[in-house]
Image: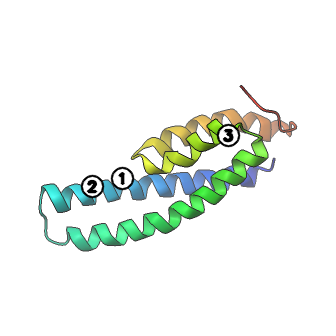
Amino acid sequence: MKKSVLTRYRVMAYVTGVLLVLLTLGVIAKYVLDLDGADAFTRAVGIAHGWLYVVYLVFAFDLGSKAKWPVGKQLWVLLAGTVPTAAFFVERKVTRELEERVADGAPDVVKA
């Protein structure tokens, strides 16, 4: 597996995570605090997160298929972009697991 596959995933995990946190804050500002401008902010961030989440799904699926992950792990990584801050923790765990394999040029092996 190439390092670029992991890098693409990491970038999209952070982008998706940040946008989801911003979206959550926007929803709180809109519905709980009733702030002016929160509606437009929430709409813009929601649209951006929705489209970029699709890109995240593609990159995460590509990473999982090249890493030969079982279906359960693959779903866990794919869904990380839907829970605020989960993408950050999942990205860190996945990166630690795969960086050694990428650096060593080791063949793709399933880790339990």
Which of the two residues, 6 or 65, is positioned nearer the viewer here?
65
**Label 1 neighbour load within 10 Å: few <14, some 14-19, many 20+:** some
- Residue flagged by tag 3: what amino acid is it? Val
Residue under the image location 57 percent in, 48 percent down: 78
- Residue flagged by tag 2: what amino acid is it? Leu
Which of the two residues, 22 or 64, is positioned nearer the viewer here?
64
Q: Mark 3 or 1 closer to N-term?
A: 1
What residue does disc 3 label?
71
- Residue flagged by tag 1: what amino acid is it? Val
In the image, which disc is placed on residue 25? 2
**Label 3 neighbour load within 10 Å: few <14, some 14-19, many 20+:** few
Residue under the image location 19 percent in, 72 percent down: 37
Q: Residue furthest top?
A: 112
Residue 97 lies, in percent from the top left, at 68, 33
Q: Quadrant of residue 101?
A: top right
Residue 106 lies, in percent from the top left, at 86, 36
In the image, which disc is placed on residue 21? 1
How far is the residue under mark 2 from the one under mark 1? 6 Å
How far is the residue under mark 3 from the one under mark 1? 27 Å
Residues under numbered marks 3 and 1 in contact, where contact means CB atoms less than 8 Å apart: no
